[in-house]
Amino acid sequence: MQPNVHIMDHPLITHKISMLRDEATNTKDFRQLVYEIALLMGYEATKDLKLTDAEIKTPLMTTTKKVLDQKVAIVPILRAGLGMVDGVLDLIPAAKVGHIGLYRDHETLRPVEYYCKLPSDIPSREVIVVDPMLATGGSSAAAISFIKQRGAKNIKLMCIIAAPEGIKVMTEEHPDVEIYCGALDDRLNEKGYILPGLGDAGDRIFGTL
């Protein structure tokens, strides 16, 4: 595995992903699980955020302690990525949220950007791109390319489930991007779905099955 790829091994993450996979899990519970997994993964993905010294007055004395010194942006890939935003935002309430939407051109089969709204100061922010599934890797790689075109330099990708094919594309096209995955699955099927996977994450989050 590439050094910039981090596969989570926390028991709570593993347990909650198993619950996500279950076809009997209803929309409400599925949505809550995505939130909880994103929060747990966000804790890991932000462990290298920069700190700085700040003077703090406690009830007993004045002291110098460390506080966060890095601005963060969370960018979900529409629409399924929206389900992960609140989990990360609860960890970093001061983070700004951008959005990026892509569709696949039926003739060229290339991802096309149809919507992109990012914070104006995106070049100075640590960017966490969120999408539950990293399947072929085409959409994630394209989204990150579009974000880089807006000046972002420090980017991480956070996904709940990844396929080896998606990891390969991402590490080849964006070797500078740290990838955080809740689980690495076996492969893609002929339709590009991750196996064993959990089905269509967007449909299960929003109840549009």
Image: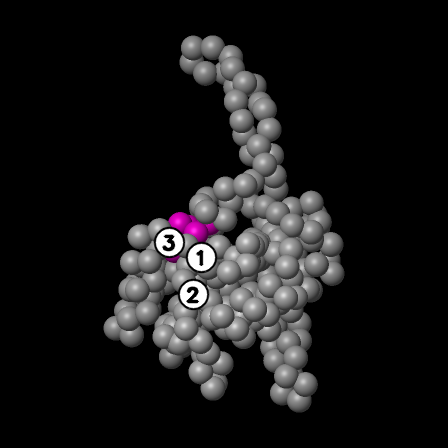
* Closest to the observer, 199 or 31: 199
* Closest to the observer, 193 or 167: 167
The residue labelled by disc 1 is 7
The residue labelled by disc 2 is 184
Q: In percent of the image, x 54 and y 41: which residue is there?
A: 48
Q: Is residue 5 left or right of residue 195?
A: right
Is the residue under label 2 in contact with that under label 1 (CB below 8 Å)?
Answer: yes
The residue labelled by disc 3 is 9
Q: CA distance from mark 1 to mark 3?
A: 7 Å
Visible residue check, residue 36: no
Q: Position of residue 208 (x, y in %)?
A: 40, 77
Q: CA distance from mark 2 to mark 3?
A: 11 Å
**Residue 68 occupies quadrant:** top right
**Residue 200 occupies quadrant:** bottom left
Q: Main secondary structure of the magenta part?
A: helix
Q: Is residue 80 magenta?
A: no
Is the residue under label 3 in contact with that under label 1 (CB below 8 Å)?
Answer: yes
Q: In percent of the image, x 56 and y 46: which residue is there?
A: 95
Name the mark on residue 35: none
